[in-house]
Image (spheres, helix red, strand yellow):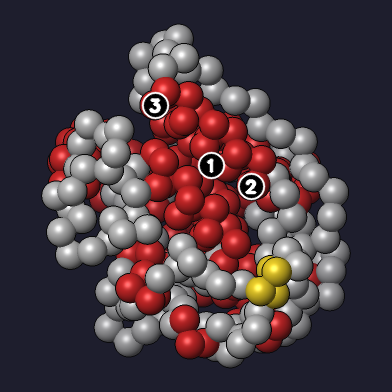
Amino acid sequence: MAKRPAEIQAANVKLLEELCQPGDFLPAWLRAAVVRETFKATATCPSCREIQADRGNVLKRDLWNVVGCAKCTFHEPEECYGLGVVVHALCNLQNLMSEEWYHQAAEHVFKCLSATDKIPDTPDDRNARLAELIAVVGLAVGIRAFYRSLPEGLLEEPPIPAAMKGEPRFSSAAEVFKRLAPQEGHGWGVGLAIDDLKPGLMVNGAKFVGEEFSKRKFTPVSPMNKWAPALSTGGSFLRWCSVLYSPIQHGYETHNFMFKKAPGRALNRVGLEDVAAGYTTAIGCSF
Ligand SMILES: [Zn+2]
């Protein structure tokens, strides 16, 4: 296999493995179930498609109820452990989301997870778990879309690995964040300011240095800001997209990095954005 496709394939395999490992707050078995549900439901769930077809009549603030009343088909046990309604909305209806949906989803995720585990009853604990779930679904959608955009036979879609054993890294948001909140004027999803990370935070037995989360990415205007609360999964995203997309760390985030080609790449970031805009417009994606 040529160097670049091999590099991309390896990054996809690694990301899928990481998605099926224990997360910061979600257990591996649940993350793996969510990945499988996302692969099966994205763009194919007939009920989600019906909602999309009638989107002109959907009130965004009412999306939670719209999905709740739809008869989605779930592929994992117990409607994907109760989280299927959140997964389907994330993978199929993101253009219809609203702040109201976000708060209802955070509450619902808390209720589902509380059924099997004792979770601290705080807004940060709800939001941190929703942020991780969103990150897992978003990345699974990304890998799935990548393989479906390729001509047949170019690269083989890797199988979804079995869930790894092990507990989530943390049991409370207070272990990780001083606070987690939407930042005034920059959308309604929670973001994270780097100064609000707990000092001396340990991740996987090592002090968390957040090399991939530079200060720029933690600022409210950065689209990366919404990945930051999903700490470890956000880190996986940044490493993965530095291979599949344009490198966005280690010097390629300077003011001229939009025009600077990384070694071995055919396009700079402006070129990639141009291609991405053409693709997402063609498929009606609103990410
Ligand atoms: Zn659905």
Ligand 1 contact, mark 1 (Cβ < 8 Å)? no
> Which amino acid type is marked by label 1?
Ala
List the single residue furthest toward the top.
153
* Residue 202 sits above or below residue 142 on the image: below
**Residue corresponding to mark 3:** 4
Q: Residues within 10 Å of mark 2 (few under 14, many from 20)?
A: many
**Residue corresponding to mark 1:** 140
* Residue 240 sits above or below residue 160 on the image: below
**Residue corresponding to mark 2:** 19
Q: Is residue 184 left or right of residue 104?
A: left
Q: Nearer the viewer, mark 3 or mark 2?
A: 3
Q: Position of residue 200 (x, y in %)?
A: 65, 84
Q: Residues within 10 Å of mark 1 (few under 14, many from 20)?
A: many
Q: Is residue 68 left or right of residue 267?
A: right
Q: Position of residue 21 (x, y in %)?
A: 72, 49
Q: Are marks 2 and 1 in contact (CB under 8 Å)?
A: yes
